[in-house]
Image (cartoon, rainbow, N blue to C red):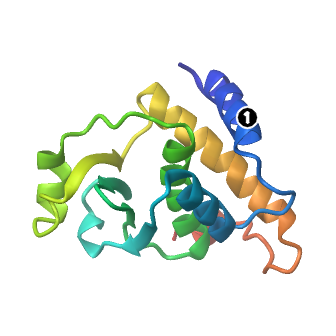
């Protein structure tokens, strides 16, 4: 799958998700929590720093957990979280085994985790689609948030 095909799938998923004209990250999270009938916890995991992973989605029996590496800007954090939310919107099956990622980063929680998806690269179609949808959602948030601070224009401001 190439990025053009991924964007086409992402556009269709975004339309099906039914966001209002001016969505926010919190609104997307709230909608996903209602759809999935479970809370979504979003938090920073310092152990991801330097690991090659910048985000994880853990599916537990009673909740979803999205963890992200420490970042230097709110924009970068938002992109990582939107990527994981995009996997939820796209209903992706999770490929990683629990033993690998959960045991490495969250040994105390690993037996509660049913499945894990880790964001590290975009070498497969699921990752491309999730990133394409995250890009579209970020654009919608930026364009819909008239009261927000202006979008940073320099790469280093966004990604540190």
Q: Nearer the viewer, residue 38 or 12?
A: 38
Circle 1 SS class: helix
Name the side, left or right, on which 59 lies relative to 138: left
Q: Answer above or below: position of 31 versus 126.
A: below
Q: Answer above or below: position of 24 versus 96.
A: below
Q: Nearer the viewer, residue 72 or 100?
A: 100
Name the side, left or right, on which 86 lies relative to 24: left
Q: Nearer the viewer, residue 30 or 68?
A: 30
At x 47%, y 31%, the residue is 126
Q: Residues within 10 Å of mark 1 (few under 14, many from 20)?
A: some
x%, y% of residue 21? 87, 57
At x 45%, y 66%, the residue is 39
How many discs appear? Answer: 1
x%, y% of residue 92? 45, 35
- Indicate the quadrant where residue 14 lies: top right
x%, y% of residue 121? 39, 41
x%, y% of residue 153? 74, 66
At x 48%, y 52%, the residue is 84
- Indicate the quadrant where residue 44 lies: bottom left
Query: Which residue, given by chain and number where applicable, does mark 1 sit on?
Result: 11
Name the side, left or right, on which 25 lies relative to 46: right
Q: Answer above or below: position of 93 versus 86.
A: above
């Amino acid at each position: 799958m190439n990025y053009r095909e991924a964007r086409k799938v992402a556009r269709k998923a975004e339309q099906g998700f039914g966001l209002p004209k001016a969505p926010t990250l919190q609104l997307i999270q709230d909608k996903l929590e209602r759809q999935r009938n479970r809370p979504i916890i979003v938090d920073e995991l310092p152990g991801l720093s330097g690991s090659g992973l910048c985000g994880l989605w853990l599916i537990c029996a009673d909740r979803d957990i999205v963890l992200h590496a420490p970042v230097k800007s709110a924009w970068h954090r938002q992109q990582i979280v939107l990527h994981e939310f995009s996997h939820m919107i796209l209903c992706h099956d999770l490929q990683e085994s629990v033993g690998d990622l959960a045991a490495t980063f969250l040994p105390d929680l690993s037996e509660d985790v049913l499945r894990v998806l880790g964001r590290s690269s975009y070498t497969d179609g699921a990752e491309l689609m999730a990133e394409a949808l995250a890009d579209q959602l970020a654009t919608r948030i930026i364009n819909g948030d008239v009261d927000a601070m202006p979008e940073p224009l320099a790469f280093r401001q966004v990604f540190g």
